[in-house]
Amino acid sequence: MVGMDQAWLVPAVPAVAFVILALVTFTGFPLPRKGDFIGVGAAIIAFILMLFVAGDLFWYPVEGDNKTRAAPDVMVVVGRPKGHRGSYMQWLEDDIAPKVVFEILSPGNRSTEMFRKGLFYEHHGVEEYYLYDPDENELSGWKRDGARLVEIAQLDGWVSPRLGVRFELGADRMRLFGPDGRIFASYAELAQEHDE
């Protein structure tokens, strides 16, 4: 259950969706098949908070080491302001690591690459790591327990401790629900509402 001290984090997931959609719109890269599962309903709220959300941006956790890096599909950094960055250099950001990371599998991803990324996230302080395969509608997740990221046994119905959203795997796609129980609308659903 999300406490009031964490309630301001609720807009993070829709903001993540906004970043993905913005990247798709401005770069021309297509969304993964069935990739509109993350809603964008509360994205504007996230932009007035101290919340940095980025997609496919290099994260350098160690000053002076340009080889230690990762580019998560989406990362959420709590306590850092929004704004353009060419990369996320952690030592210039009050040494704050991303708290939540999402990876969305695509046909080009290899299991060794995803395993290596998981170790990187574990070593560099990520609190929650989610891996979604939209083609198979499979979600995996890990949460921090001390120095380790520990696999979350059951993710259908899981509530993110940091973001306060609930994950549900339907027959064909994942859906996200806010702490109030309302489903986050997909981009297609929002566009349809707008057209009506």
Image (cartoon, grey):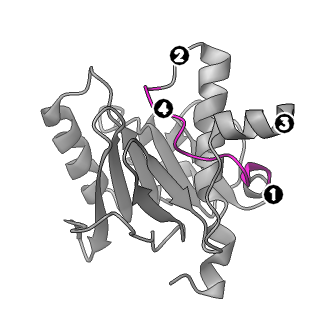
Check residue 38 for magenta coloring.
yes
Label located before the other in sequence (4 or 1): 1
- Whole-percent x and y of residue 4? 66, 86
Q: Which mark is residue 48?
A: 1
The type of residue carrying mark 1 is Ile
Q: How far apart are the alpha carbons under marks 2 and 1?
A: 27 Å
Answer above or below: position of 18 versus 22: below
Q: What element carries label 2?
A: loop
The type of residue carrying mark 2 is Phe
Asked whether 12 or 171 is in front, the reply is 171
Residue at image position (45%, 69%) is: 160
Label 3 belongs to which residue?
A: 194
Residue contact between numbered discs 1 and 3, judged by CB atoms under 8 Å: no
Residue at image position (53%, 66%) is: 165
Q: Is mark 4 on a helix, strand or loop?
A: loop
Is residue 50 in view from this perspective? yes
The type of residue carrying mark 3 is His
Check residue 147 for magenta coloring.
no
**Horizontal side, residue 37 vs residue 121: left or right:** right
Residue at image position (36%, 32%) is: 66
The type of residue carrying mark 4 is Asp
Q: In which quadrant is the C terminus drawn?
A: top right
Label 2 belongs to which residue?
A: 29
Asked whether 91 or 55 is in front, the reply is 55
- Magenta residues span 32-44
How many numbered callouts? 4
Label located before the other in sequence (1 or 3): 1
Label located before the other in sequence (3 or 2): 2
